[in-house]
Image (tube, grey):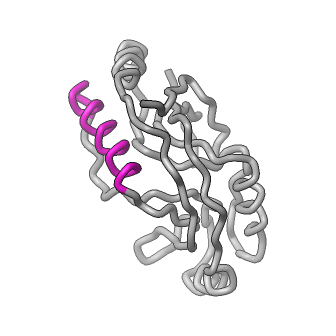
Amino acid sequence: MPRLFTGLEIPSETALMLSMLRGGLRGARWIDPENYHITLRFIGDIDDRTADEVVAALDRVHREPIEISLNGLGSFGNGKPHAVWARVELTDALSELQAEQERILQRLLLPPERRKYTPHVTVARCKTSTNEDVAKWLSERGNFRAPSFVAGRFVLFSAKASVGGGPYLVEEAYPLAA
């Protein structure tokens, strides 16, 4: 199976609002709106047997739907920006869903995620953007806010091994319902 990760899908109305942020950032490679998502847990490249175990184990997650709010923009990069993103407010429900998936995947002997969980929607990869380019772009659009939405499921996505940005395919979907 290809590279895997779990995430939440972005509704089309929210994706349209995010797509309006495109442009004005030199050196950016914009993510297509159909590939916007909120990553819960990156899994990586795994063999088919392990992928089947992941699919079965995630089926044991039983949680309520989660209200999602996007509010503000930011960037990732240590010294040089590599992505700009829309901030997702970290609620208890979102944090608990992510932590449960982390525990499940570690029980399958997958390596733990090393980075602190920062929920976000990547809108562009910064190929040659400078710190100044990103700072200017953020200052011009930093008051971004979208109406909240309810995530009624989480999904297992696959991606081609590449530099990121899609296309992403839904391999399995898991309803969020008590």
Residue shown at 21% from the left, 28% from the top: 107
Q: Total label count?
A: 0
Q: Is residue 30 left or right of residue 117?
A: right
- Residue toward you, 66 or 47: 66
* Looking at the image, residue 20 lies above or below residue 161: below
- Residue toward you, 120 or 48: 120
* Residue 47 image point, x, y percent: 40, 19
Residue shown at 47% from the left, 31% from the top: 177
Residue stretch rendered in magenta on the structure: 92-110
Q: Is residue 107 found inside the magenta-colored segment of the image?
A: yes
Q: Is residue 69 left or right of residue 116?
A: right
* Residue 153 image point, x, y percent: 53, 34
Q: Is residue 109 left or right of residue 149?
A: left
* Looking at the image, residue 56 lies above or below residue 138: above
* Residue 102 image point, x, y percent: 29, 39
Q: Is residue 69 left or right of residue 11?
A: left
> Overall secondary structure of the magenta stretch?
helix
* Looking at the image, residue 93 lies above or below residue 109: below
Q: Is residue 101 found inside the magenta-colored segment of the image?
A: yes
* Residue 159 image point, x, y percent: 57, 35
Residue at the limit of the structure toward the front, as seen here: 178
Residue shown at 54% from the left, 23% from the top: 172
Q: Quadrant of the C terminus?
A: top left
